[in-house]
């Protein structure tokens, strides 16, 4: 019956449908409240080491119950007290009667609340960063093949992929910077002045600073913010979530490109053997993974407005109207980023390029693109530029009419060959229509970009990827 009850209430698809177990756990109640207990243990240990009357028995009792949370009792306590931190203080104290007098000693709610948020942000970045690296790596491996071409102003698939890679590389550096810039709130007291701890240590400023340093180190941070209000500055949330929103913009652009190319049948995301593209049209192969990434990336971009507004309306040392908003915006940003990266990785690992389709498109477009080359060749052969331009203009419009009005192939080249005016350059036409002459330095740019930008970025993680990184074209 309990399992059936789960389907009687709303479940966030971010967790129930999409996100990885690791990221879902990172923002879970169990992770949150066990981290609160660990922070209370760190505080007790540091206070004991610095001379407060806390015993080994009390610390050991707390450690033995760090994972043993009675969630039903905590919920009932919160219902009565209307205060989540005190509800868990009482719940922890219930199973630690000896330690009850010193749990949360000198601390404010934000000691556990904000510090836990910072731990979750840090750990969230640690979950995301390998996924960005893997997407970079998969794009890098996929297009270390001879370049293929596509119509318009010709470029190569490899060059286009490097544009995607460049944006992902920027995101990877931004995520790493945001992760490394995170500091611990530390032990700062009610309004950030550390007054309660200064009183506990009878005015000894050195011991208060050492307490802050010790707890920060126990929590795995190198530094704590030197000044805070009751909370750490909510600009930290802006900094963290802006990197995720920027990543969302990158993935949206990449997947939009893939969707456009899929419509041209030039590139396609993986499609499984028994996958159904449409309930009504069995032939369809919708780019559903790329569409999912675009859909969720929009949500990630929209979430960015929350920390911006929250930081702007904080009153003095803090205001509690940040709390409910951050319970949603912080986890959802990381969960959404996690989903789109996992999906992007799935796309890049199985992306298929269809060079024959690309070649066919080029054959249709290349004669039009080559008209300037034909004019230049005729001038070199002694022709008049304006006369040649007019000849090409007329023939091009005739060929375009065949393509647009009759649905035929582009026959401009045949018309040029049939016109005696162009006899002086007929022997050059094949060379003038060679696709590789239209792509400029794309292959050289790709080779240099992979060598100078991508390889150094991925090299430190080469062993973890368990795939040899090659850069030969």
Image (cartoon, helix red, strand yellow):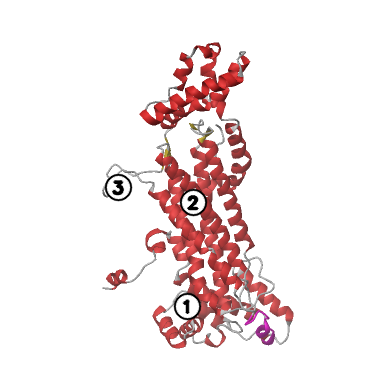
Front: mark 1 or 2: 2
Q: Position of residue 266 (x, y in %)?
A: 42, 36
Q: Residues within 10 Å of mark 2 (few under 14, many from 20)?
A: many
- Compared to residue 448, the image places residue 102 above or below, namely below
At mark 3, the secondary structure is loop
- Residue 114's tag is none
Q: Is residue 425 visible?
A: yes
- Compared to residue 446, the image places residue 343 above or below, namely below
Which of 235 and 301 lies nearest the eye of the viewer?
301
Q: Position of residue 8 (x, y in %)?
A: 30, 71
Q: Tell me which label, 2 or 3, sits earlier in the chain.
A: 2
Q: Which residue is mark 1?
A: 65
Q: Which residues are magenta?
A: 189-199
Residue at screen point 49% across, 51% down: 252
Residue at screen point 56% across, 42% down: 163
Q: Quadrant of the C terminus?
A: top right
Q: Quadrant of the N terminus?
A: bottom left
Does residue 119 appear to the left or right of 226 in the view shown?
A: left
Q: Which residue is mark 3?
A: 276
Q: Tell me which label, 1 or 3, sits earlier in the chain.
A: 1
Residue at screen point 40% across, 50% down: 289
Based on the picture, tell me whether residue 393 belongs to the magenta stretch. no
At mark 2, the secondary structure is helix
Q: Which residue is mark 2?
A: 252
């Amino acid at each position: 019956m309990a399992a059936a009850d789960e389907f009687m209430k709303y479940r966030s698809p971010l967790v129930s449908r999409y996100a990885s177990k690791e990221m879902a756990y990172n923002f879970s109640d169990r992770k949150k409240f066990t981290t609160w207990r660990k922070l209370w243990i760190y505080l007790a240990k540091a206070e004991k080491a610095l001379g407060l009357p806390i015993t080994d028995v009390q610390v050991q009792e707390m450690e033995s119950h760090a994972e043993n949370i009675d969630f039903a009792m905590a919920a009932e306590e919160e219902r009565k007290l209307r205060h989540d931190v005190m509800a868990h203080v009482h719940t922890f104290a219930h199973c630690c009667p000896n330690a009850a007098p010193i749990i949360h000693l000198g601390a404010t709610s934000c000691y556990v609340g904000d510090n836990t948020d910072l731990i979750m942000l840090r750990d969230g970045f640690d979950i995301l960063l390998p996924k960005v690296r893997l997407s970079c790596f998969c794009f890098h491996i996929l297009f270390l093949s001879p370049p293929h071409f596509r119509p318009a102003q010709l470029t190569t698939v490899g060059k286009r992929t490097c544009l995607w890679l460049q944006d992902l590389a920027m995101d990877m550096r931004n995520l790493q910077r945001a992760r490394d810039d995170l500091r611990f709130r530390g032990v700062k007291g009610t309004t950030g002045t550390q007054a309660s701890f200064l009183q506990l240590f009878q005015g000894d400023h050195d011991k208060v600073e050492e307490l802050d340093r010790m707890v920060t180190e126990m929590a795995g941070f190198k530094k704590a913010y030197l000044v805070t209000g009751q909370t750490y500055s909510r600009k930290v949330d802006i900094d963290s979530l802006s990197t995720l929103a920027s990543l969302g913009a990158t993935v949206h652009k990449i997947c939009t490109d893939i969707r456009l190319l899929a419509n041209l049948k030039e590139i396609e995301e993986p499609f499984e053997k028994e996958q159904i593209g449409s309930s009504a049209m069995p032939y369809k192969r919708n780019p559903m993974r790329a569409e999912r990434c675009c859909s969720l990336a929009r949500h990630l971009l929209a979430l960015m407005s929350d920390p911006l507004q929250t930081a702007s309306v904080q009153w003095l040392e803090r205001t509690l109207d940040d709390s409910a908003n951050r319970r949603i915006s912080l986890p959802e940003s990381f969960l959404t980023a996690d989903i789109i990266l996992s999906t992007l990785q799935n796309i890049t690992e199985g992306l298929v390029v269809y060079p024959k389709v690309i070649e066919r498109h080029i054959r249709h477009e290349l004669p039009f693109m080559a008209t300037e080359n034909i004019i230049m060749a005729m001038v070199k052969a002694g022709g008049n530029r304006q006369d040649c331009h007019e000849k090409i203009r007329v023939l091009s419009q005739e060929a375009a009419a065949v393509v647009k009005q009759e649905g035929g192939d582009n026959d401009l080249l045949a018309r040029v060959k049939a016109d005696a005016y162009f006899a002086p350059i007929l022997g050059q036409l094949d060379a003038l229509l060679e696709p590789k002459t239209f792509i400029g330095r794309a292959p050289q740019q790709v080779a240099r970009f992979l060598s100078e930008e991508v390889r150094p970025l991925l090299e430190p993680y080469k062993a973890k990827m368990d795939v040899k990184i090659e850069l030969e074209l």
